[in-house]
Image: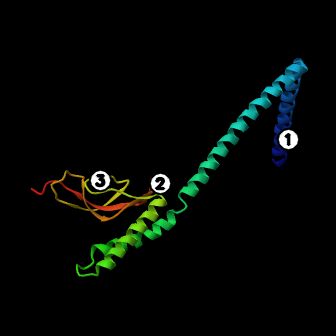
Amino acid sequence: MLSRMAENTQNVENTEKVDIEAASAAATEKTAEKSPEAVLSEKLAHADERYKYLYADFENYKKRAIKERQDMAKFASENTATELLPVLDNLDRALQYAKADTDPNLMSGLKMVAQQFKAALEKQGVAEIKTIDQAFNPELHEAVGQMASEKPTGTIVQEVQKGFTIHGRLLRASRVMVSTGSAT
């Protein structure tokens, strides 16, 4: 039984060798039929086509690498900005909930610091997302609740937490309350 299997395997191998040799001989005959100039012309055309494909691939690679470097530089401050947004939130809360009898100079100083902080973030491409009276957009807003109002259904009526983008890319979604329509 084993000898028959070995014999069959040997036959398959011999058949494959014959097929490969026949194909090689056919290719040699075709080449022999063509003049040397035609063969060289074909080889040159093939090499030229391959060169064009490789050149196009390399050009695409260069463009992709440049774009990636630009994006890396553009969004390099994304992590830092994300970590600084809670600081800005706390500054805004301090200004919003300060008591009426707080020293006006302290309040003025806090307002200047908050403005300076926002300006520094804007220089890095960070922009605040507008929310109030805007239509709810799930790509920019996160609904934390609904409330009845006189505004149309789906309109943002209250901002719970400000959202920000960096160079058009979402940095933090705005947390908002959305109108359910008329209270009547």
Badge 3 marks a residue whose secondary structure is: loop
Query: Residue 46's x, y, as percent?
Result: 78, 29
For residue 147, side relative to residue 61 (left or right) = left
Q: Find disc 3 in the rendering and name its residue.
A: 136
The part of the image, by quadrant, that contains residue 149 is bottom left
Between residue 38 and residue 123, name the one nearer to us.
123
At horizontal 90% and vertical 21% (from top left) the residue drawn is 36
Q: Nearer the viewer, mark 1 or mark 2?
A: 2
The residues tagged by marks 1 and 2 sit, at their Cα atoms, a distance apart of: 68 Å
Side of 128 where 17 appears, left or right: right
Amino acid beneath label 2: His
Q: Are marks 1 and 2 in contact (CB under 8 Å)?
A: no
Q: Is residue 102 above or below residue 155?
A: below
Relative to 32, is 69 on the left or the right? Answer: left
Which residue is disc 1 drawn over? Answer: 10
Q: Position of residue 79 (x, y in %)?
A: 51, 65
Vertical side of 183 occupied by 88: above or below: below
Q: Amino acid at mark 3?
A: Phe
Q: Which residue is mark 2?
A: 167
Tell me if mark 1 has few (under 14), some (14-19) or many (20+) residues whose alpha carbon lies within 10 angstroms of its own: few
